[in-house]
Image: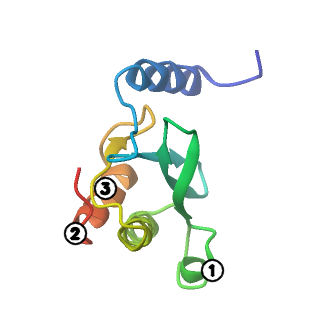
Amino acid sequence: MLDVSKRERSRVRRHHRVRLRVYGTPDRPRLNVYRSNTQLYAQVIDDTTGRTLVSASTLDKEIKGKLKSGANLAAAAAVGRLVAERALKANLKAVVFDRGGYRFHGRIKALAEASREKGLKF
């Protein structure tokens, strides 16, 4: 196995366990979140076809220039708002939230709350 920390292996194991139950359909795709030390990524995925319908990250042009850092609460909220806007524009109103094995607090919670404020239902 790659030289990965025990914490990351535990997160991946939790993520696989959660993915047994969390499944995105065309009606309710899955909002997946990945958090690195420096960036935050979110995708809306239809698991029946395996396609990413909408995505947003702290590296997007709309967000990158406005942020001091890609790894703080403000960046997470900006990504949440952007992914919600793009999902609503693609006529996706409801999603299933996949926190990726991370705790629902901090940046993950900020992204989720910002998405809900913009009108995404989950």
Q: Which residue is mark 1?
A: 61
Q: Position of residue 45 (x, y in %)?
A: 49, 46
Mark sitting earlier along the chain (1/2)? 1
Classify 109 as above or below 7: below
Name which residue lies at 53% across and 46% down: 34
Q: CA distance from mark 3 to mark 2?
A: 9 Å
Give x and y (percent) for residue 74.
40, 71
Front-most of 20 and 72? 20
Residue 61's quadrant in the figure?
bottom right
Specify which label sits upstream in the sequence, 3 or 2. Answer: 3
Q: Residues within 10 Å of mark 3 (few under 14, many from 20)?
A: many
Q: Residue at image x 30%, y 42%?
A: 104
Residue at the disc numbered 2: 117
Which labelled disc corresponds to residue 109? none
Indicate left or right for 85 with 46 as reference: left
Q: x, y (%) of residue 11?
A: 49, 26
Residue under numbered circle 3: 112
